[in-house]
Image (tube, grey):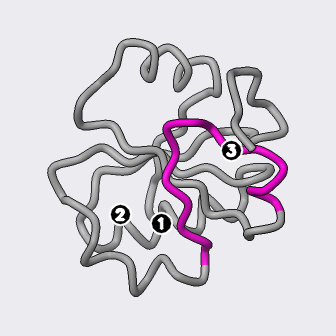
Amino acid sequence: MTEINEITPNELRNRLHDDEKDLVVIDVRENEEVAQGIIPEAKHIPLQQIPESLNELDTDKQYIMVCRSGKRSMQAAMHLKEHGYKVSNMAGGMLEWEGDIKA
């Protein structure tokens, strides 16, 4: 099984605050979930669209995958890692996120 790095919501918030240029947050939740709030810096790509979205992603960037609890984002992270992307999963998902969100 592919080993995926996990990052805590707090670590992610700190890294976003530090404005890391190569960091990209991808929220893989469904549209109705994202409508309830998304990390402002996050890009929304629903889980089912991840495979066909790979050509839009840059292998030089560091991706952090996010969902509600961390399970779907882990699936997405494994898919990206299998295709050569640098990727981590946000442990606990949006249930654990205490930073800013936008509707």
Please identify, in this view, whether the residue under mark 3 or under mark 1 is nearer the observer: 3
Is residue 75 or residue 34 the one in the foreground?
A: 34
Please state which amino acid type lies under the numbered disc 1.
Met
Q: Amino acid at mark 3?
A: Ile
Above or below, 26 against 84 in this view is above
Asked if disc 3 and disc 1 are in contact, CB closer than 8 Å, the reply is no
Real-space Cα distance between discs 2 and 1? 5 Å
Residue 81 location (% of width, % of height): 35, 63
Q: Residues within 10 Å of mark 3 (few under 14, many from 20)?
A: many
Q: Quadrant of residue 94?
A: top right
The residue that label 1 is drawn on is 78
Task: Magenta stretch: give its range.
Answer: 33-47
Residue 81, numbered label: 2
Which residue was labeled with disc 3? 38
Q: Write the residue at 71% across / 51% down.
A: 70
| Circle nearer the N terminus (3, 2) | 3
Does the CB distance between marks 2 and 1 fall below 8 Å?
A: yes
